Image: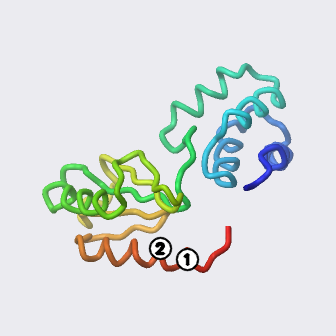
Amino acid sequence: MKDTTAVVKSVLDRWNNDSACLISILLDIQEELNYLPHETITAIADSLGIPLIDVYSAATFYTVFSLEPRGKHIVNVCVGTACHVRGGKRILDRIQRDLKLNPGETTEDGLFTLETVRCLGCCALGPVMVVDETYYPHMTTKKADTILSKYRKDSEGVVA
């Protein structure tokens, strides 16, 4: 587990303790820790000299931020209209069954967090699944199984 104090200090130094860079600071800290723990939000507010509520407001307004621990890999399934009519719900159901969780939850091993999104802006490619920042177009249940198996396999030999 990473030292949250050291992460916060490093990120704040990178952004010169500039409160105008709050969103970038939050993004960088989340990239390092995979979520925004309460103690990091408090440390950011103290270091930047801004009210704690201002940091929480930014962290809760944008859906990209999470105040809860998330998996190593974030799996997003598009459930927008175009993806839905092309089988997006079937893909989501299969992934939920495979990972044994609902959208917004993280697997017990901390490997995956499942989320849904209303539209990814690539409707012609639907149904679409995104793992981390990699887009997988024309998704099928078989492709979803293969992709998630690959992420599992790739993570097995890696020491965190």
Callout 2 environment at 10 Å: few (<14), some (14 to 19), or many (20+)? Answer: some
Left or right placement of residue 82 versus residue 33 in this view: left
Q: Which mark is residue 152?
A: 2
Q: Is 84 situated above or below 44?
A: below
Q: Quadrant of the N terminus?
A: bottom right
Callout 1 environment at 10 Å: few (<14), some (14 to 19), or many (20+)? Answer: few
Left or right placement of residue 28 versus residue 60 in this view: right
Q: CA distance from mark 1 to mark 2?
A: 6 Å
Most foreground residue, 115 or 86: 115
The image quarter in which residue 56 lies? top right
Left or right placement of residue 1 versus residue 115 in this view: right
Residue 109 at x, y percent in the picture: 52, 60
Q: Quadrant of the C terminus?
A: bottom right
The image quarter in which residue 129 lies? bottom left
At x 26%, y 70%, the residue is 139
Whether label 1 touches label 2, CB < 8 Å: yes
At x 23%, y 57%, the residue is 93
Is disc 1 placed on a helix, strand or loop? helix
Residue at the far left: name it: 85
Residue at the far front: name it: 108
Which amino acid type is marked by label 1?
Answer: Glu
**Which residue bears the numbered disc 1?**
156
Is disc 2 placed on a helix, strand or loop? helix
At x 67%, y 42%, the residue is 26
